[in-house]
Image: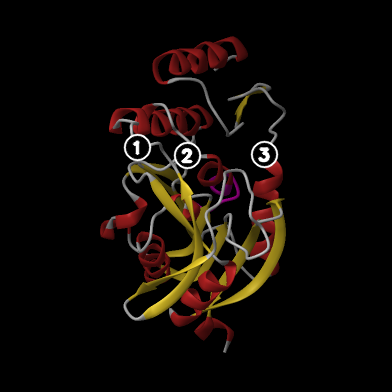
Amino acid sequence: MTKAEIIAARDKIAQRFGSWTAHDIALGEGVSTLDKGLWQQWRVDQFSRLLREAGCDIPGSRILDLACLEGMFAIEFARMGADTVGLEIREAHLARAEFARTTIGLANCRFVQGDVRTIPPELGSFEVILCAGILYHLNFPDCVQFLAQMAERASRFILIDSHFAYPNIDQSVQPLGKMRDWIFEGRHYQGREVIEHATHVTDEEKRTTHVWASIDNNVSVWLSENAVISELQRCGFEIVSRIKGSAVDRPTLLFERAARRG
């Protein structure tokens, strides 16, 4: 496709499904989905560096990108040679992601519509599972069950980029509730409640207007970092890297299956 053809096709998708909101993906001929200088490429570079430093051979690995939004991580890791799957619940996000994938011509990347709270079993297992941003949009106990699901499906690495609850941080990108305890199956977890949607917001508005928020729950629970680490340790994973992220309460954590490190 020529530059003009790529721009025209991109704009047609934007007219139908809305403009890209977050992921600036290079489409070729100097065109990207947002034309913002690939402003989030640093996150791709950060994630790939962490994985490589931990011994992950990205080319040939199966990588699952959960709540993939507009597909940046699935696409960029596929460019590196991985076999990637992006799981996303919103149709508009999927349409934009699929457009980018087909425009680039990536046969080793695909997108699937689905809810991360129930990862489709037919997707199988993955060497790497990416959880970039979705954990803090889940309510309790969904967030705990989600961690266990990732542990079941990841044969080696889980990478989590998320806001966490901390006793000394009372204000974040959204107002935070008080630090408190929750109990699930006899285990205790600390965290803070965060409002995702006002109670009067309709399900349709949640799906189509509030596209960076949860799909249905009005409240989410941000688990503490220690609670997440402890839960994944219970599921057989150990933390191997922790680096600062885009906010003081949003680090990136890399976990590896403990048996692989024994």
- Residue 18 x/y as whole percent: 45, 20
Residue 238 vs 134, above or below: the answer is: below
How far apart are the alpha carbons under marks 1 and 2? 24 Å
Residue furthest out toward the front: 178
Residue 199 disc label: 1
Residue sitting at x 35%, y 64%: 141
User: At which x and y percent is residue 240?
Assistant: 64, 74
Q: Distance from label 3 to label 2 (Cα)? A: 13 Å
Mark 1 surroundings within 10 Å by alpha-carbon count, few (fewer than 14), some (14 through 19), many (20 or more)? few
Which disc number belongs to residue 40?
A: 3
**What kind of residue is marked 3?**
Gln
**Magenta range:** 77-83
Dot 2 crowding, Cα within 10 Å, few <14, some 14–19, many 20+: many
Whether residue 51 is situated above or below residue 112 in the rendered picture: below
| Mark 1 / mark 3, whichever is N-terminal | 3
Rendered image: mark on residue 120: none
Classify mark 3: residues with Cα within 10 Å, few (<14), some (14-19) or many (20+): some
Say which amino acid is labelled 2. Leu
Numbered disc 1: secondary structure: loop
**On the rendered image, what quadrant is the C terminus found in?**
bottom right
Relative horizontal placement of residue 164, taking residue 147 as reference (left or right): right
Q: Which numbered mark, 1 or 2, is in the foreground of this view?
A: 1
Label 2: which residue?
69
Q: Is residue 190 magenta?
A: no
Q: Where residue 153 sits: x, y (%)? A: 38, 67
Residue at coordinates 57% horizontally, 46% vertically from top-left? 175
